[in-house]
Structure formats: C-alpha cells, structure tokens
Image (cartoon, rainbow, N blue to C red):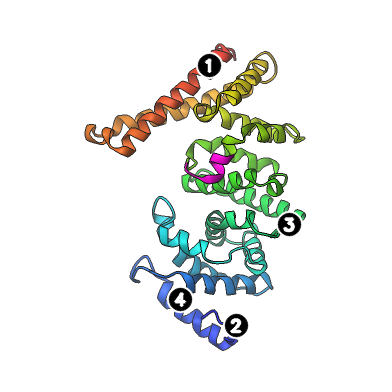
Amino acid sequence: MASDALTDQHWAAARLLAEGAWGNIEDSSPELTDLKEVFEFLDHHLGLHGAGEDHTSSIIVAMDAILSEWFTGGGPTPLLEESARNFNCASPSFVKGVCLALGPRNSLDLRGGIFALIALTFDQWCNSPAPVMEPEEMAEFCENLAVYVIDDVIHASHIQKRGLTVLFGMLRSPEWRSHIVTRFWKMLAYCITVDEELGPFAWCLQNATELLDFVRGLPDGEGLKWWYGTLWFHYDKLDNAVRDEVERIAKDMSLGDGLSDLNLYLNLIGQEVVRTRQEVDKLPDEDKLDVPGMKLRTRLIALEGNHHRLSLITGGRR
C-alpha cells in the first residue's frame, strides 16, 4: 500500500478500504496485529496534508486504528510502541504534516489524535541525526501544543500525561528546551501524574541542577517557578546534593517574595496527598499487599515526607 509506484487511483481505493477496515475498529473489526501498513497510510496522507491537501478524515481513521487501545487503556501497547519505533516518524513530510494538523484551526478530534501521536513519537524527533524543524518552527509548534493542552483540554488526566511526556522530552534536549513557550511550563503543575519509568523524566531528575541553571536564565520566571516546584513534588527521588540546593533555595524564598510560590507547592502536594490517601483507603485489604497497592502506599509515604519537609521550611508562614 505504501509503494511509491501507487497512483492516485490506488490511494483513492486504499482510502475506501481503510474506512471499511479501520473506521469502526472499536466496534467490529478484529484486533490489528501489524500496524506497519497503517503507519504507511498515515505517513502518506500527512505528507499530502503538509502539501496543502485536505485529508483530515483519512488521517483520523488511521490514527484511530493506531491509537485505539491507547485511547481506551492506560498506555501504549507493546505492538504500538514497537511499530512506532520501527517507523521513521521524524521524516520531513511526517513532521510537517503533524505540525500543520496540530494547528488551532483544526478540529479537536484531529488535534487530539495528533497530540497522542506526538507523545508516542517525540523521542524520535529529539534524537534525530538532523534537527526536524527550524528554530522558529519549534517555537510555533510549542505554542500550538500549549494552545491545545493548556487552553482546551488540560483537565483530562491522559492529556496531562501525554503533555508531560513531550515536555520532559523537550527538557532533556538542549535543542528543544530553549523553545518551550511560557505557558507550556504550567504542565509541570501536573508532574505527579508522569510515568516515573519515563526515560526523559528520570534524566531530568538526575540532571536537576543543570536544568535549574537553565531555567534561572529564562526571562519570565515561569520555567524556574514550575521546575523548582517539580523538584519538591519529587524531593524524595533527588540525590543529597540536589536536596541541599533545593532546601537552600526554599529558605531564601521563605524570607522574601517567594513565599507565595512555596505555599502554592505545599497546597498542590497536599492535594495529591489527600487524593492518594483516598485511593489507598479504597483498596481492599488483599490488594494493599500486591505490587500496585504497595507502590501506591510507598508513593503516599513519599509525598507525605516531601510535604512535611517543605512545611518545616515555610514554618506555616503565608
């Protein structure tokens, strides 16, 4: 189906077949066991979209087929991750089509699927041998991300997780991090929902001081505000040197204009403590001893410790 020898007539027929095979995949179609052809179909129509043709319906059908299990489940399936890894999602035509489809004039359905696709493949963009965009295109892309996530759908938990996947990927990349727009930093208010096994997240905590130095140099203060708050949310995971620096900063902030930000962090962590405690309390006794139950209880203990440590520094000052 993806052969360069296919004519426009072949692709028109392929669109009809795709609509029939993938259009109602959640209702009646058999589970897909090979996503290669779906990615090829999507790649072709993203390329056409980037060239100015409107193939929105074909793009949505292909994305629904690729992402259906992710939309209904907790995360990408192994098949989906492997298929994305084996496909070149950093080609110029693919990237251009994705960026145009993310534009705010497009429908929420299209932008939602594209956003999920970005979260799935963004690591390829960051690790591409050559930059996938020019600097001004990176800034526009990040602005469109912020419009979709912050303005339209931020309160959906799966959107928060995908937004954080992209943001931590940007933070790990020296090329991308300087193009993070001001309001996209607010995604870090939801940093507690991040998948802690996410590679870029682990890198960011391991290189917390490097990122602190970076955000200190930003002109608007939003990067510093939210990255520093992230470090308090995950204080328990920091090494001793970073903890000492984080506490030193908090002590300085508590004596001046930074107290309001510290209280913001305290309130956000406190809300997460309450929510996590409620989750633990709802668990049947037998589930509290299984692996997910133990992880949840461990996370609660860590959050309570982080909250307590910060509250000692602020001393209850408001």
Determine which residue is flagged by label 2: 4
Give the mark nearer the N terminus: 4 vs 2: 2
- 21 relative to 287 in the view: left or right: right
Q: Nearer the viewer, mark 2 or mark 1?
A: 2
* Identity of the residue drawn at 53% across and 73% down: 40
Assign the C terminus to one quadrant of the image.
top right
User: How many numbered marks, from 0 up?
Assistant: 4
**Point 52% across, 60% down: residue:** 113
Name which of mark 1 and mark 3 comes first in the sequence.
3
Give whichever of discs 3 and 4 has the lower sequence position: 4
Q: Nearer the viewer, mark 4 or mark 1?
A: 1
Sequence-wise, the earlier of marks 2 and 1 is 2
Look at mark 4 in the image and give the residue it sits on: 19
In the figure, 177 relative to 83: above or below?
above
Q: Which residue is mark 3?
A: 137
Residue 111, disc: none
SS for dot 1: helix
Of 209 and 247, the residue lying toward us = 209
Magenta stretch encompasses residue 201 = yes
The extreme left residue here reads 286
Distance of label 1 from label 3 (alpha carbons): 42 Å
Q: Which residue is mark 1?
A: 311
For numbered disc 4, what is the local secondary structure?
A: helix
Give x and y (percent) for residue 102. Answer: 62, 59
State which region is magenta.
197-203
Q: Secondary structure at mark 3?
A: helix
Amino acid beneath label 3: Glu
Q: Are marks 3 and 4 in contact (CB under 8 Å)?
A: no
Amino acid type indicated by mark 2: Asp
